[in-house]
Image (tube, helix red, strand yellow):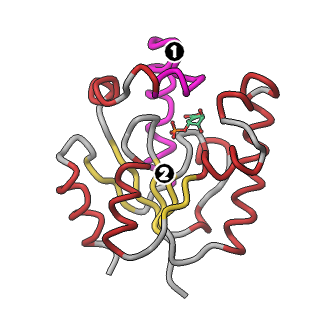
Amino acid sequence: MMQNIVLVGFMGSGKTTIGARLAKHTDRYLIDTDIMIGLQNSQSVKNIFDNHGEEYFRQLERHFIKWAEKNIQNAIIATGGGMPAFNSIEKLGKIFYLKIDFESIKKRLTQNELSARPLFENPNKAYELYESRQNIYEKCANISINANQPIENILMEILKYTI
Ligand code: S3P
């Protein structure tokens, strides 16, 4: 059985972008947990937060993790930024932390991408959250990757560990 490659990190750290490139390169498919959860519930993550609250979204994430543990292998999994803060994800596969500076995140995210992220509405609060998440990502990851580099370098680093 081939282990999944799991990407964790803060909102805007490039999990989905890098996950897509990894998927193509390794001839696997990318599973984006926010998209899967949104589709299963016929609404965007933003609407789930607005209509049901964060706690409900975290339950949906937990539900996804249980399903993924049993049913997904040999895939790339891009997680929502809070997933490892609320639930254990160690059984999902080999975990890579995309570690990036807060300034780089702000540069990467467009206005559209910001408005799709309820926990990024207030930049000061987002920064506090960013700080409080660092340890969590470090602890849950098998490998930390410097994600302030060009995407090609990030890809090469991850690929080194995934043969
Ligand atoms: C969240 C990150 C988001 C999404 C939700 C909550 C978080 O995913 O799951 O808005 O708590 O950090 P991205 O990391 O893909 O933005």
Q: Position of residue 20 (x, y in %)?
A: 39, 58
Quadrant in the picture for residue 158: bottom left
Tell me if mark 2 has few (under 14), some (14-19) or many (20+) residues whose alpha carbon lies within 10 angstroms of its own. few
> 10 Å neighbourhood of mark 1: few (<14), some, or many (≥20)?
few
Report helix, strand or loop for mark 2. helix
The residue labelled by disc 1 is 125
Q: Which mark is residue 139?
A: 2
Picture quadrant where residue 59 is located: top right
Is 130 in front, or is 116?
116
Q: Considering the numbered disc 1 on the image, is that residue within a helix, a strand or a loop?
A: helix
- The amino acid type of the residue labelled 2 equals Lys
Q: Position of residue 70 (x, y in %)?
A: 72, 74
Residue 119 position (above or below residue 60): above
Q: Is residue 84 left or right of residue 95?
A: right
Ligand 1 shown in quarter: top right
Front residue of 136 and 103 = 103
Looking at the rendered structure, the kind of residue marked 1 is Lys
Q: Is residue 134 left or right of residue 72?
A: left
Residues in magenta, as a range: 113-140
The N terminus is located in which quarter? bottom right
Q: Nearer the viewer, residue 125 or 75?
A: 75
8 versus 92 height, above or below: above
Is label 2's Cβ within 8 Å of ligand 1? no
Q: Whole-Å distance between the Cαs marked 2 and 1?
A: 22 Å
